[in-house]
Image (tube, helix red, strand yellow):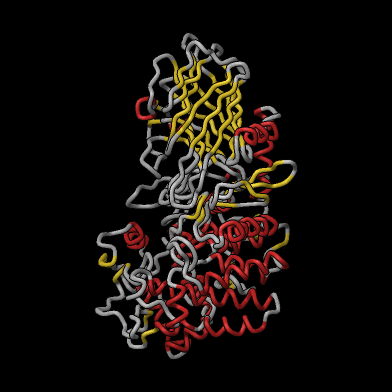
Amino acid sequence: MGYLQYVNIKQGTFSEHRFSNGNTLPLVQLPFAMAGYAPQTEDRGGWYYHPASRSLEGVRLTHQPSPWIGDYGAFLFTPQTDVLRDTPSRAWSGYRPSEAVLTPAYMKLRFLRARTDLELTPGVRACKMRLGFPDGRTPFFSVFPVYGNYTFDVDYAENKAYVTSDGARGDFHEGFKCYLVLRFSSPIDAKNTVISNKFLHLAFCTRQVEVDAATSYIGFSQAEKNLRDECGVSFDQMRDNGERIWEEYLSRIEIEPTDERQMRTFYSCMYRTGLFPHKAYEIADGKPVHYCPFDGSVREGIRYTDNGFWDTYRTEYPLLARIAPKEYAQMLEGFIADYRDGGWLPRWPSIGERGCMPSTLIDAVIADAAVKGIIGGELLETALEAMLKHANTDAPNEDLGRTGAGSYVKYGYVPNDVVHRDSVNLTLDASYGDFCIAQVAKVLGKTEIERTYRSRALNYRNLFDPETGFMRGRSSDGRFAEPFDPFDWGGDYTEGGAWQSSFAVPHDVDGLAALYGGRDKLLEKLDALFSTPPLYNTCGYGSEIHEMTEMAAADFGQCAISNQPSFHLPYLFAALGQPEKTAYWVRKICAQAFSDADDGFPGDEDNGSMAAWYILSVLGIYDICPGKNETIRIPMLCKRASILGEPLK
């Protein structure tokens, strides 16, 4: 049975800056490969593809994990004929979206203005393209810059082009360059080729041109090796291989669906879970090597990038623990390499550390792998050393480590007059992170560390206000922030307010219930959460942010399923003894908020996290607390399912 036929790689792409139905890209990419490829319909920053657009600027070699993070090391490929234009905004062509072919392992686009077909199929660090130009016009293959400084060069004797980009965002990408080598099946027409420092227009005399392309973060010689390693096969062979790889990944979970819509949604989501993080290492002399963003050196070992742990720890990694434990272990080896290379575990790496979201939720990714036996030994020892460092030490840069670590150690919470944003979420995440440290210490037999951090993991109680029943920001002298309105977003809360943030105690649900006066009282509060209208105040942000708009549009009360902090809320009912309520809300959310369509997500999909929530929910399994080897089970939404060939009961 083939699963690729059910995948819509445009799922979630019908999005814009002010309203997200996924904020995804239609990535033609192998699972966890170093780069992906996507049509660029119009360059609007991170929002450079829209499925309703009738314009086509080219095909982008992309690493973008989120429009909020942006791209790096990107290149735009555009076929032109006769009249050349020197910018994508002038070289764009009309195209018919309905005629475009976009699958995980293959794309075919027709540029109407150039009367040219472009086909592409990806490898891990390379791709192959085929271009069919029209008769009677001079064919050109243009390479345009996307972001940063570019260099362009041509070797006419070898029919190759060499391009570099230093485009990357943030502070931690010392000496970064992405090196691109292009090899052509037809001789390059030197007379008509145009090179500048802003574009490259390669001319040809033949109508059919094949292009092999490979990139490297290390240098042109490594890019040449990557090209030799992957492009020594035909276009069709590379495509067939890519389809086999995707079929194997998608088939790791097999379901008997209730209907065709569920089948399409499920496997479109499965594709999404196989895109990030990206490999950021290459093979030299038979060994993995990687560019180190902290000092620009080349070091031995594996590295991965393009992942926001604040989002992905909740669902993506618990899913990978079930379907891709070997890949999960390798990813952790790469993430821990960042600690060895730069002294800190990653928070939001996108070639370099971006520090986009607060806290160090990689703690949960490490702890979950530890308790499930995915990693151990020296690697886990190093991970624990790194976790202890960021749990107790203020980093020299706000993008590194736990924000407010020093004040958290001093006060038992992060005071909002010391750290002026996100103090509630920083405290709750630190408390949970301490629990994760205790779990790793337990696996390693470090009893004293386990005891210390299991005690620290109860610090969430320091922010609970029994009068309102919410977690609230406190100053260093112990006073709760005033005035207080549970509909206020921002300020002491991250991408939400008190309703969305106060139940983020996955490691101690019983302890949280005790603060409310028992399980029944906490269940009453959860009922209120789902029945309270999706009201919000913008005061903490100064204006409306898209997560507010999306919560109101989805309308599951104050459960903002459009954003990751609400993912566990429906499952709290089951954790407190009412699985029927969890089943009710999960079924309702899956039916109303998810589909395989271009607008198929209720908010930012975020590196597989929202897609994984849907998959786990259809399967009726959910790890409410990554770092505990415990699973909540409710009735499956499909008829039957198996994981890695084992029936799910």
Q: Is residue 413 above or below residue 326?
A: below
In this rendering, the answer to whether 259 lies above or below 35 is below
Residue 181 appears left or right of 42: right
Q: Would residue 109 appear left or right of 443 to someone viewing this image?
A: left
Q: Position of residue 610 (x, y in %)?
A: 49, 58
Which one is nearer the viewer's eye here, 189 or 563? 189
Residue 618 visible here:
no
Quadrant location of residue 541? Answer: bottom left
Q: Is residue 525 visible?
A: yes
Is 551 on the left-hand or right-hand side of 12? Answer: left
Residue positioned 46% across, 72% down in the render: 569
Question: Which quarter of the rendering shows the N terminus?
Answer: top right
Residue 441 picture location, percent across and down: 65, 76
Residue plotted at (54% across, 76% down): 434
* Residue 592 percent location from the top left of the image: 43, 59
Q: Which quadrant holds the C terminus?
A: bottom right
In this view, the residue in front, 608 or 376, is 376
Check the image and name the residue furthest to the right: 286
Q: Is residue 141 above or below residue 638?
A: above
- Residue nearest the observer in this picture, 102 or 402: 402
